[in-house]
Amino acid sequence: MLRRHRHARRTLVALAALSLTLTVGATAANAAGKTAPKTDRTSPYEAARVDRVPAPDPGWWDCAAAFADGAVCGTVTLPLDYDEPNGATTEVALLKVPATDPAHKVGTLFVNPGGPGGSGVQIAAAASQFLSPSVLEKFDVVGFDPRGTNYSDNVRCFKNLGEQANALAGLNVPFPVSDAETGAYVASSKAFGKGCSTTGVPLSGSMSTAEVARDMDVLRRTVGDQKLTYLGFSYGTYLGNVYANLFPDRVRAVVIDGVLDPVAWAGTPATASIPQTERLRSGEGASKALHEILARCATAGPDLCLTAGLGDPETVYADVVASLKAQPVVLTDENGEPLFEITYAIFTAFLLSDLYSPDGYTWVDQDISAVYALQNPGTGDAEAARARLAAKYASAQAAPAARSDAFGSFAWPYDNSPEAFQSVLCTDGKNPAKAESWVPAAARADAAAPGFGPLWTWASAPCARSTWTVRDEDAYWGTYSHRTSAPVLVVGNYWDPATNYQGAVAASSLLPNSVLLSSDSWGHTAYGTSACVTDAVDTYLLTSTPPAKGTTCTGDVQPFVAAPGAGDRSRSAVPERSLPPVVPPLPGALPRS
């Protein structure tokens, strides 16, 4: 990524100049009163880079036994650097679930679950679990693992698992609280950045979202589609947004659900001193959702909300937090032996995990009342509380334990999910120079959103630019206001704890040919939480016709109100991954993406 063929660079610069001339010409035409084109065009600069790459053959093979009925898998080899199409390459994995009504197929629906670092292969394999039958009938569903992640070639920032574990040991808390934890977190953040800027090169410097968007455009040609149809969740909304702005005339239908504010994600010179994950205001979204649940708990009363039976829910929550800050709760097994400590940070991570689900209010209520019962003997069923929290601990530890069980020899599997997450985050966004800058940033975030603010903010500490020095000169820095050939459907959820609703408002306000679909629903992302949202998205995917501007839906599941029975379209499992850990990192487990 750091070297260029001079003649290729001169050619591309010339094309960029041509593109600028055409843009200036269009602006002059507008000033003269002439009609401007309705759709922005892919710049000759970008088209020259991507279109000269031949559409690769995935070599599809039957992988139904491993993934899903009818699924076929493939791999393609793509340029590591699109400025050097005959240079170094990287392998990308794909999975396709064919349309159930191929005679009436509309095209291919590309899906991405978020992350960054989530598996497109796995979400495509789960298509029947979250996509409507009408969509499955008319589309081949294709997911690909973004370069550097999952089944694609993996980025590795450390020589082996032991080196990785030692370097990242300080990140093994949801967020640091004590001075000792803070020092360890800063030290590991620096080690992370240095590892990915040395051992992880060149792949770690070639994983920006722009590179993945270019890969997706090549794959669009591979499956034979003239324009892209796409459904992206969480971080996947940034991928969809970047694609729409790089290739605005190649959009058939793009849905982005659970939307990142694109300018906050990438940053600007004016905001580079603010950590990327503070700019997103995710902590404020989570805090807003939690306190709304507590308010509705108070209204519902003890018949529907356990916490209300303990007193004013806000007061009970504040008491739990104050007690945990003073002294963690030690959870014991059935024999009374210590199992693990529930610290303030771990409790906050538990609550964030709860808030991801449409029915997360139930788990929030149970977690608060369970910890309160252990802190205040005689106020609740301590044994039931202990069993609930022990089960939650066991669930959080299940994935690390499964990886440990696989260590049958010295050929230990290398889990690159920390690098997969961080390499995209740090390559995409501007951040402060030193990891120490996250200390005051976390304090600011904590003032705005206690607990949740620092949990989200610390996630980008490894991106400090003095230690994360690898760069992708072809990353995308905006603008995010290109007019696409078809409307982009932007879906925002009022109570999203990961992608603040204001991110959807910001993205839609920038895209001139977009429609904002708002939803008064709960959990992370909105598709599947009500027939209203699901039908609007499905109709748009099938027909390219978005809902009317100003449409607002209401989620089927509302806190402390029985969900409707017949016709309930809420999803029970979301096949996606989010920005920081859905399962909070606990002692003995590496940070998860």
Image (cartoon, rainbow, N blue to C red):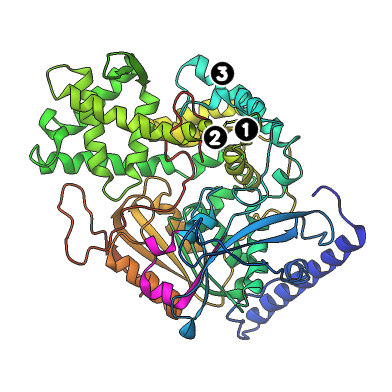
| Contact between labelled residues 2 and 3, with CB atoms less than 8 Å apart | no
Q: Check residue 140 for magenta coloring.
A: yes
Look at label 1 and name its amino acid. Trp
User: Where 66 falls versus 323 (above or below)?
Assistant: below
Which residues fall within the magenta stretch? Answer: 126-143
| Contact between labelled residues 2 and 1, with CB atoms less than 8 Å apart | yes
Q: Is residue 559 visible?
A: yes
Task: Name the residue tied to disc 3.
Answer: 183
Task: Name the residue tied to disc 1.
Answer: 412
Sequence-wise, which precedes: disc 1 or disc 2?
2
| Neighbourhood count class around disc 1 (C-alpha, 10 Å): few under 14, some 14–19, many 20 upward | some
- Residue 336: horizontal and vertical position, in percent? 27, 13
Look at label 3 and name its amino acid. Gly
Which is nearer the eye, 348 or 446? Answer: 348
Left or right? Give the position of 453 relative to 47.
left
Q: Check residue 91 for magenta coloring.
A: no
Sequence-wise, which precedes: disc 3 or disc 2?
3
Label number found at residue 406: 2
Q: CA distance from mark 3 to mark 1?
A: 30 Å
Which is nearer the eye, 78 or 321? Answer: 78
| Neighbourhood count class around disc 2 (C-alpha, 10 Å): few under 14, some 14–19, many 20 upward | few
